[in-house]
Image: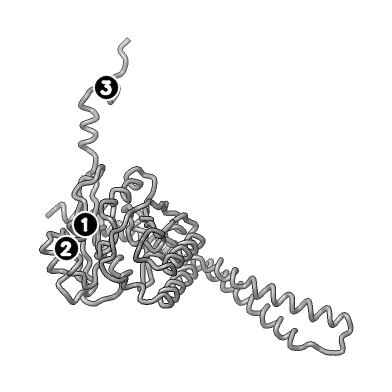
Amino acid sequence: MVQPQSAFSDSGSVERLQAKRRPVKLIIQIPCFNEAEHLGPTLADLPRSIPGVDIIETLVISDGSRDATVEVARACGVDHIVDLPINKGLAHGFMAGLDRALREGADIIVNTDADNQYRAADIHKLVRPILDREAEFVVGDRPIPDIAHFSRHKRALQHIGSWVVRMASGTKVGDAPSGFRALSREAALRINTFDSYTYTLETIVHAGLSDVRIVSVPIGVNGETRPSRLVRSIPDYVARSARSIVRTTLIYQPARSFVLMSIPLAVLGTILLARWLWLYVDGSPRAHVPSLLASAGLLLTCVFLWIAAVLGKLLAINRRLLQDIQYRLRKFDAQLNEADDERR
């Protein structure tokens, strides 16, 4: 009896299947604002080949730069340039880069900073979990305790901020403020940010609550080339980061946020009401009206917060539906752009 021949029995089958495999394109994007001095060395350090990646291209986003950032990018042979007319902030530049990278057919997008603070040789560590289908979003975990130019206060704030983001997002990201990260095409199509200050915290919370698989990988850093533009001072950084986390939590988890805010008010209001009832039943000669009014005010505020939680839950459902629509529109727009490029 003749046995059926396996699809892989001849030596050329594997080669034919590999030939049909769609080439994997990686685009490394670099948001810039007046980075003409540092952009050249940053671009020079980028890898030219990575195992599992067939095409590597570079993308520079000039966020309203007033120096020669764009000219330096062109002189260095950057594949794609987004030249925004005015400065709108790091988060806006990050999202503009994702949009352009998707239009250019990127399968994986790596984001790094223009000041060359992240070790470009570790980009392969970022893309490996995506290539192995272990994650859709990878964040580079810096060795915070070993970074010489980080003050003790900044190191503590980095750890506290990352812990808060982990609690808000349900992820295990070790270094939430790290801008050295990789996203799969699917993750990039779903990511949003509404914060003009920074994209780092919000995108992790959004991804974590949208069931995007996130992992961290250890990466190295280079020496400091210039002071951070995000951390003008420790109090300013704490205030801005706290506002970003609170805003993000309210946007993506409104019901949980309002319920949590109501708990201490409900406890205090119940204690004051129980005290008033006890004194009233005990026959106290005083009316204790202030306690009754305070209890009523606290419990009434709780009712308003619970109503806000219900409305927030409904809005969250609506937001998920709108995100799905946005995802489909982004995907269609990117596919349409790729088809136009192929026709040309």
**Residue at x-position 48% and y-position 71%:** 246
Residue 159 in view: yes
Q: Is residue 295 above or below residue 63?
A: below
Q: Residues within 10 Å of mark 1 (few under 14, many from 20)?
A: some
Give the quarter of the image for residue 19.
Answer: top left
Q: Which residue is mark 3?
A: 9
Camera-nearest residue between 107 and 173: 173
Marks 3,2: beta carbons within 8 A: no
Q: Is residue 265 left or right of residue 241?
A: right
Which numbered disc flags the more N-terminal residue, 3 or 2?
A: 3
Q: Residues within 10 Å of mark 2 (few under 14, many from 20)?
A: some
Residue 98 in sight here = no
- Say which label, 1 or 3, has the lower sequence index: 3
Is residue 54 rendered to the left or right of residue 307? left
Q: For mark 1, what is the residue?
A: 104
- Please say if the residues under marks 1 and 3 sit with CB atoms less than 8 Å apart: no
Q: Answer whether labels 2 and 1 touch (C-beta < 8 Å).
A: no
Horizontal relation, residue 274 to residue 213: left or right = right
State the image coordinates of residue 186 (x, y, percent, origin top left).
Answer: 34, 53
Q: Earlier in the sequence, mark 2 or mark 1?
A: 2
- The nearer-to-camera label among 3 and 2 is 2
What is the three-letter code of the residue carrying label 3?
Ser
| Residue bearing the label numbered 2 | 40
- Describe the element under mark 2 as helix, strand or loop: helix
Q: Quadrant location of residue 38?
A: bottom left
How many marks do you count on the picture?
A: 3
Left or right: 114 with respect to 302?
left
Q: Give residue 257's position: percent from left, percent from top.
A: 55, 69
User: What amino acid is at disc 2?
Assistant: Gly
Residue at the extreme front: 148
**In 3D space, how far apart are the residues under numbered discs 1 and 3 (Cα atoms)?**
38 Å
Residue 274: x percent and y percent? Answer: 78, 76
